[in-house]
Structures are given as C-alpha cells and as structure tokens.
Amino acid sequence: MRKLLVGFVAVLMMIFAVVPAASALDLREGLSRETIAKDEVIDDDVLMVGNVLRIEGTVNGDVFAFGDTVIVTGAINGNLVTAASHVEVNGPVSGSVYGAGSDVFVTNRVGGSLAAAGSQVVFDQGATVGHSVLAAGDKVYLHGTVGRGVAVGADSLWVRGKVAKELRAYVNDMRIESGATIDGPVEYTSDEEAFIAPDAKTGQVTFTYGRVEWEHSTSFWAGKWWKAISFVSFLGFGLILLALFPTLRRNFPQLVLEKPWQLPVTGLVALIAIPISLVILLLTVVGIPFSLMGMLAFPVLLYFGQVLVAWAVGKLLGDYLPAMQNWSWPVLFLVGAVLTTLVVELPGIGWIFGFVSVVYGLGGALWLMYSRRTAA
C-alpha cells in the first residue's frame, strides 16, 4: 500500500483500457480557459488541455482533461481521466473517474469506479459510485455511497457513508463516524485503533498493528507526486502529439515491424555519438550555440521516442489481439504507456527494458526524421 500513490495512475489506466471508445478524438487546447458550453453535445472522445477547463455540456464519449483546474458540471457518458491542481466532478459520469490533483472533489453519480489521489480527496455526501473506490492521499473523506468495496491508503480517513462490501485501509488515523454503514468486513493497518461510533454498522473488524510510515516531509511528498505527475504528463503529451500528427500513428508501428533490429542499433549509436558530438562542439567558439541547442533538443528527442514506443506497444497489441482490435487509438496508447511503465519498474531487470525502450525510441525517431527528409 505504501506504493499506492506512486503506481496508482498506471494501474488504473490498465483497468480503464478494457473500455471500448470511439475511433476519433476532439482536441481542445487553450492557454487560459477552455469550456464545453451547457448547450453543446459532443459525440466523440475529448482531449482538453489548458489552465481552467470546464465541462458544462454533454460528452458522449471519454474525456481526458489536463490543466490547473478541471470542473465538471455537465454529463459525461463515458470515462473521465484527469490531472489538475483542483478537480471537481459535480456532474454525472456514466463510466469511471480517474483523477489526480492536490484537491479532488466528487459530488455526483459515478457509474463505474472511482480512483483518486490527492492531498485531499472528498467523496461527498449524496455522491454515489456504482463499483469500487480506490483512494490515496493525505486526507480522505468517504461520505457517499459505494456499490462495492473500498481500498484506501492515507494519513487520515473519515467514513460517514455507505459501503456495500469490504473496506481495506492503510492509515495513521481512521474514524468510522455516526451513520456510517459498511456491509462487509473492515480490515485496516495502523499504529492505533480506529474510532468507530457506537451506532455505526460494520462487518467484522480486523485491526493489524503496524507503524504506518506515512511521512509528511517535503521530500517524501515531492518524490511521490513527481512520479505520478510525470506519468500523467507523459500521457497528456503523448495524446496531444498523436492527435496533432496522425502520420506518426500510422508510420511508426509499421516501421518497427519493417526494421526490428535497425532501429535499436541506430538508437544505440546515436545515444553514444550525439552526446560526444555536443561536447566537441562545446569546445569550439563557433559550435557553442549549436551545442547548447542540441543539449536542449536531445532530451526532447528521447522523450518523443518514448511516446512512440508506448504507442507502438499499444498499437501492435491492438493489431494482434482480437479483443483489442476495436479499441480507439487513445485507449491503445494508454495501454502501451501503462505496460512500458510497469515493465521498466520491475526490480532487477527493469533497467534492461528501460534501456531497450530508449534505444528503440531514439532510433525510431531518427528513422522517421530521415524518411521524412528523404521523401521531401
């Protein structure tokens, strides 16, 4: 459970990948505000990027929203995947909600599951979730109705709502307050027993003593949030890139099949040669500007290559697995991003897959640039 916050987005995206979606994507990008108006109906998946994002209309598809503030007051007839400093889900969502932010508030109906990570996660009174709830953060408030089970990793947990099945928690402080109803067993790990109100209804309660090292230091939270935000940022960057350049979606997976060994060899040579060349240029007066520009461009090229690798993994799986052949390209990219992230995190051997991913991505990016230049 201590790694819940770090791996939470990746694991949940894997769950989300089983949901079919449309084959297109409505891209909405604004530097300050971007709004889906109250009378607007979108029969498509939507990608929104900006500072303040408002969904006031109806979206008949999945919504991917990345910004500083995301507020949903309209209806989403699909899934919501969002990352922002402040997230409010005040409108109904027929699918599942996957949200990460400093503050995450849910006040309406969620037809599927709810997965949320934040400094403060509030599942408000009157809100309902049809399936399960997975929450991680500093403070978690569970005051609504959950159709199945709940799993929480937090410093403090307050329960005042209704849970149809089990509650499992890894916490420092837990309070099951007056009016709470938990039909299944309650299993929690903490260094002190929870407060359970006399009129609260629960199944069998199992308390496991264990000092929960839920550190509050800046370095701890910065490291955890940085990993989660980095992963979500990678998803956002990849979705925008692949939406703006559909030729990449068509060409790169085919290039992997046509040149299975040429790409990693090219990437390996470039991984060694480019840094050496940049250092040599830095030693010459004329080459200094070019070296500095190259030092800025090289990490971007590596990042770009990782997006291509994640996309190729998802696309090739979609081509060869019958169950995935009708999935939309955004969902396939999410699958690929999840799998590549999880494989790289494998203890002991993850670095090997990470290295292979880097050289494949770098080689693929260079091959695409060369092919485009040749065609031009």
Image: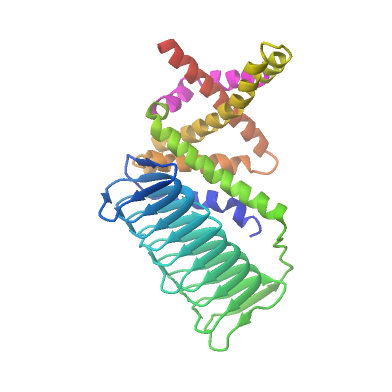
Pick the quarter of the image with the C terminus: top left
Give the vertical position of 294 relative to 44 (above or below).
above
Which is nearer the eye, 11 or 35? 35
Image coords of residue 25 (percent x, y): 34, 40
Residue 273 visible in the picture = no
Pick the quarter of the image with the N terminus: bottom right
Image coords of residue 212 (percent x, y): 71, 66
Q: Residue at x 67, y 36 (%)?
A: 351
Q: What colour-coding does the image apply? A: rainbow
Give the vertical position of 45 relative to 307 (above or below).
below
Residue 292 visible in the picture = yes
Residue 266 within the magenta-colored segment of the rendering: yes
Q: Residue at x 58, y 25 (%)?
A: 297
Q: Is residue 342 left or right of residue 249?
A: right
Which is nearer the eye, 103 or 188? 103
Magenta-highlighted stretch: main secondary structure? helix
Image: magenta residue range? 250-272
Which is nearer the eye, 78 or 320? 78
Image coords of residue 177 (percent x, y): 55, 81
Residue 49 within the magenta-colored segment of the rendering: no
Q: Residue at x 56, y 59 (%)?
A: 118
Total number of numbered labels?
0
Q: Quadrant of residue 31?
A: top left
Q: Quadrant of residue 295?
A: top right
Q: Is residue 350 left or right of residue 256?
A: right
Image coords of residue 281 (percent x, y): 69, 14
